[in-house]
Amino acid sequence: MAATEATPKFRDTDFRTVPQSTDYQPEVLVSAHDGLRFWQFMIAGSIAGSVEHMAMFPVDTVKTRMQAMGSCPIKSVGFRHALRSILKVDGVSGFYRGIGAMGLGAGPAHAVYFSVYEVCKEFFSRGNPNNSAAHAVSGVCATVASDAVFTPMDMVKQRLQLKNSPYTGVSDCVRTVLKEDGFRAFYASYRTTVIMNAPFTAVHFSTYEASKRFLMEISPENANEEGWVVHATAGAAAGALAAAVTTPLDVVKTQLQCQGICGCDRFKTGSIRDVIQTIIKKDGYRGLMRGWTPRMLFHAPAAAICWSTYEAAKSFFQELSSCNS
């Protein structure tokens, strides 16, 4: 019997079509895990981290100058003053001093960062894409692992970014620090960095995941077509909020990494409390917020670039896997 003949025969008048409300929106499903392999997350993260930090490096240089100069016996400097100072003393090339160290550290560190995050997110979320606590905890795990890789090169980068830096380059800085201060100097700020980045990544990842889902639910029918816009917007919101919250600890980290050079104070204990007390004594509580403007100007677009690049790299691997299957 043909399908057209069967339809009237089995039609039941007791069944009625359930009307849908005008504000009905189809549910947006966000996978808790993307099904990629560990090495694919590492490559995607490495690309994203390198692109992000290279693109925003000049802003990071201005932030470092602002945060480090305050511990010297001079008045605090603002964003414009630091900008003019770099241009006057070093020219445009001054904005890129230390970029070699960033290039060496950003790729491996972000490879660890995103791969650990994805693995932990899958484990802690248990398939629930709305578990903000799982995203926050996963971010903390990611930063503890990645900071162990990135901190030494970050220290080298910041010393090269300083005004009148005594080092000729990355290798000279590494050799000099090893000779004068020993290997421990490369990790002088590791504890502070982790303490700073733990709340930073907790806020960052949970805000990003929540913002991404919110933006996709606003226009679910265009979620795929506007994917990069969603990732960039959610990333910018997450980066700006996380940067604002953790600026005081970032100032402490910069002081520890730049201590003893270019007139900056050297701290006896290296404790966070010791550094904070020194900053407040010399510059008041406002000293703890030095560099917040360039820090937010750095992290908002940096996170937008990083997340959109990372998600694009993941999509590439997913399409590659589907083509090979």
Image: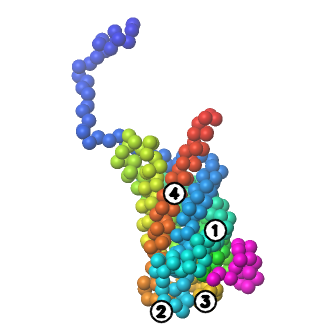
First in sequence, mark 3 or 4: give its number.
Answer: 3
Kindly identify which residue carries mark 4: 305
- Judged from the image, the secondary structure of the residue bearing numbered disc 3 is loop
Look at 40% across and 42% down and name the residue there.
222
For the residues bearing labels 1 and 2, Cβ distance under 8 angstroms: no
For the residues bearing labels 4 and 1, Cβ distance under 8 angstroms: no
| Mark in front: 2 vs 4 | 4
Q: Is residue 292 left or right of residue 274?
A: left
Q: From mark 3 to mark 2, how far is it between C-alphas?
A: 17 Å
Q: From mark 3 to mark 4, how far is it between C-alphas?
A: 35 Å
Residue 175 within the segment the image draws in magenta:
yes
- Judged from the image, the secondary structure of the residue bearing numbered disc 2 is helix
Seen in the picture, residue 16 relative to 252 is either above or below; the reply is above
Residue extent of the magenta highlight: 164-183
Kindly identify which residue carries mark 1: 99
Look at 58% across and 58% down and name the residue there.
51
**Which label is found at residue 141?**
none
Q: From mark 1 to mark 3, how far is it between C-alphas?
A: 23 Å
First in sequence, mark 4 or 1: give its number.
Answer: 1
Seen in the picture, residue 288 relative to 106 is either above or below; the reply is below
Q: Amino acid at mark 2?
A: Lys
Image quarter of residue 35 = top right
Kindly identify which residue carries mark 3: 263
Q: Is residue 50 left or right of residue 127?
A: right
Q: Amino acid at mark 1?
A: Ile
For the residues bearing labels 3 and 4, Cβ distance under 8 angstroms: no
Position of the C terminus, as image quadrant, is top right
Q: From mark 2 to mark 4, how far is it between C-alphas?
A: 38 Å
Q: Amino acid at mark 4?
A: Ile
For the residues bearing labels 1 and 3, Cβ distance under 8 angstroms: no
First in sequence, mark 1 or 2: give its number.
Answer: 1
